[in-house]
Image (spheres, rainbow, N blue to C red):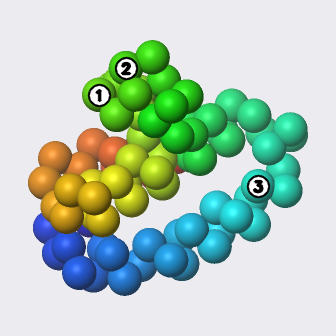
Amino acid sequence: MKAGKLQEAQASTPRRASITRASNRWPNCFSDLDKSIDARADDFEKKENDPAFGGFHRIEKALFAEKTTAGMEPVADRPDA
């Protein structure tokens, strides 16, 4: 993601998604992390434009809907990404 290599970042996303699905077994134990890692745009007041929207779904939106890695460095640097 941070290197700006769209195809490589897209290729790593299925692996990340499987990790996220596996972690869905524990949302009640780590609800604060669940929101920052697995939240969807609809969970935020400003939807996709909300600065708090991050995690895997924000990364997937950039990689597959917007087809870019530009501007995603701060999201990729967050520990919840």
Question: Mark 3 or 2 closer to N-term?
Answer: 3
Q: Which residue is mark 1?
A: 49
Residue density around tag 3, few if under 14, some if 14–19, many if 20 or more, within 10 Å: few
At horizontal 19% and vertical 64% (from top left) the residue drawn is 67
Q: Is residue 48 visible?
A: yes
Task: Residue 55: give x, y in percent of width and height.
Answer: 47, 47
Q: CA distance from mark 3 to mark 2?
A: 24 Å
Quarter of the view holding residue 13:
bottom left
Count every numbered label the image shows and give the total.
3
Task: Residue 5: give x, y in percent of width and height.
Answer: 17, 75
Q: Amino acid at mark 2?
A: Lys
Q: Amino acid at mark 1?
A: Asn
Q: Which mark is residue 46?
A: 2
Question: Mark 3 or 1 closer to N-term?
Answer: 3
Q: Is residue 45 above or below residue 7?
A: above
At horizontal 21% and vertical 56% (from top left) the residue drawn is 66
Q: Which residue is mark 3?
A: 24
Q: Is residue 69 visible?
A: no
Q: CA distance from mark 2 to mark 1?
A: 5 Å
